[in-house]
Image (cartoon, rainbow, N blue to C red):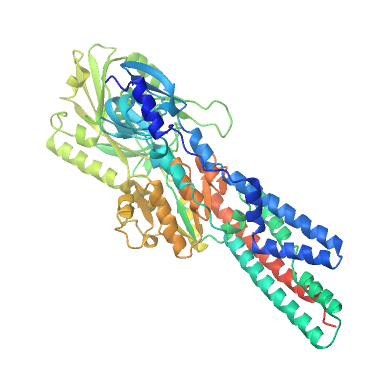
Amino acid sequence: MPGLTQDEAARRLAGVGRNEVAFRKTRPPYSRVLAQLRDPLMMVLIAAVALTLAIGDHADSVVIGLVIVVNTTVGVAQEIRADNAVAALSALSAPHARVRREDADRDVPAATVVPGDVLLLAEGDIIAADAAIDESAALLVDESMLTGESVPVDKDANASLHAGTVVARGRGVATVTATGKAAALGRIAALLDDRRRPTPLQLRLASLGRVLAAVTLILCALVLAQGLVRGLPAGTMAVTAISLAVAAVPESLPAVVTLALALGARRMAARHALVRRLPAVETLGSVSVLATDKTGTLTEGRMVVQQVWTPRTTVELQGVGYEPEGDVLTEGRPAGPAERREVQEVLTATALCNDAALRPPPSASPDSRWEAVGDPMEGALLTAAIKVGCPDLTELASTHPRIAEAPFDSLRRRMTTVHALPSGGVLVCLKGAPEAVLAATVLTDSPETLRLARAEAARFAAGGYRVLAVASGLRQETPRPAAAGESGLRLLGLVALSDPPKPHAAATLASCRAAGITPILVTGDHPATASAVADRVELLGPNTTADHVVTGKDVAGGRVPDLTAVRVFARTDPQQKLDIVAAWRARGAITAMTGDGVNDGPALHQADIGIAMGGRGTEVARQAADLVLTDDELSTVVAAIEEGRRVFDNIRRFLVYGMAGGAAETPAPP
């Protein structure tokens, strides 16, 4: 593919514009200040300043004026900080791209990429624009920031690529189909452009301001009219009416509200919840619906081998993350030597047929963790191999050097490696999707064994696990190519992997239900995975199952009459998440949305309370959110909601006190 000419690329760039996320027009400072002053309660305070000046009470005028200045400054500062989501989104764009133009490979600024350009992709590249794949070689793309999937996705010819995603493995050639605002990042930026609606506290205070202003004016008019009818001097009655208006205005209320919210935000920060917008503190106390994503929020966000099946036994592996620690159990008891040997044979083969590596914690800090270098799923297989006592991985690679391989691709759906044995001959190791491995053309096992393996694989898949079948075989000579050795092998077993729920996820959701909050799951992952996770964390409560899962296509197609009747959504995109939030808000619910990916940004921005993960979350999610969890724990949300309810109660008590005090100060008509 020769690619575009330089002249043609320049012509298209002039026509479609630069490949950049469009920024919305920045509001001038005076516009932000006027928006704050248009608040009804602030207008009442401005009127109070005018009245106190009219009666010569300059001390009160200064105090009320300072309250107006402080509240306006705080409001404008919060609004500016909350408008940085699109800027963070732009930072995700690739700084440069490798393209083919005029039959030559060129490194160009990503902003100059145009539809029709031929992208050349390699491991670690950020994809500069939406594109369709023309050629791929073991291409694996991390799309978690857009889709929420916990593992990278295999891509073959004709598959779609999205701007901002990352090539995790392999190589590819793709033709650009959309850039700038038409690409994935641009469409998300457009969804972020909507303005927030006022918080429940702001709505209540605005309503209070309107009522207070109307009642004050009516009472002042009545007092003035009554005095004039009785023949009292007009000047005296004017001063009396103005004094009545000043006494009726609770000028300290905005300052007290700001102070209460600030103290609440400080207490939340001590409990790992950072507040980005002060009104969000009170809104948390009004939350009635909690929409949570799956990966990293309800689950650990890391693939783990949880079960290994062989024709003779099944074992369960405990532990989280890539830490090579955890018990090996059979039917709830520690696995015996014979059972361990069978599982070791399975996981030794997966350790050999593997391109990942494990990186130990960089320090002794309790926050340091083992990390996988390469495919997260293959990293999980290495962790499992260490747990069950397989030979040292470095020594294993030394004694069984790889001499040939057939990489995984989405057509064959399996990977094969060939290793030299110390005793002579070679060992063929194969792992892949059960439907690609459990076949008579690949394995020599009996039909009954294959039937049992297929049934077990189906059971694992129905439980939301990702399943791999593992096989091996001895050869006297090295098969050329390596794929020629994918026959006459012996089935070793099945490996079931998943992203396990966090230990306290079920208890946290139970606390939400006890507090009158309805939890719902909104994820971009597979429906079976979403359903399985919902069951494990008891999203619907104990003794219930998430047997009804709605997909994003169902939402987009209008096939769901009432979105608020659904508790589990899968395969959702940013627009559908907005639709779900809008449906709940139309019912009068106060919605909180958690998320960590770019795809969560619009919903976080539009929800009454957007809650981002501070550790693993993207900058886009953090900038779009009202609340950032520094510990990435959903239980912190429950603690923040408790604090929000306490703040609301304190503000309500002060309002009653302030109104009573104002009534007591109201002067009697002469």
Where is residue 19, by image quadrant?
A: top left
In the displayed structure, would residue 301 be above or below residue 215?
A: above
* Whole-percent x, y for residue 63 in the image: 81, 58
Tally of marks: 0
> Residue 443: where, in percent of width, then height?
16, 29
Q: In the displayed structure, does residue 5 sit left or right of residue 70?
A: left
Q: Nearer the viewer, residue 223 or 277?
A: 223
Q: Quadrant of the C terminus?
A: bottom right
Residue 316 against residue 441 in the figure, above or below: below
Q: Is residue 33 left or right of residue 126?
A: right
Image quarter (top left, top right, bottom left or bottom right) of the N terminus:
top left
Q: Residue at x 28, y 47 (%)?
A: 462
User: Left of 136 or right of it: where is 96?
Assistant: right
Residue 642 higher or lower than 378, as above or below: below
Kindly tell me whether residue 537 is visible in this rendering.
no
Residue with the most extreme bottom position: 230
Give the residue drawn at x 34%, y 29%: 140
**Left of 382 or right of it: where is 212?**
right
Residue 518 in sight here: yes
Residue 364, horizontal then vertical, whole percent = 58, 28
| Residue 383 vs residue 416, the one in the foreground | 416
In this rendering, the answer to whether 23 lies above or below 205 is: above
Q: Nearer the viewer, residue 35 or 517?
A: 35
Q: Camera-side residue: 471 or 11?
A: 11
Residue 146 % position (x, y):
41, 40
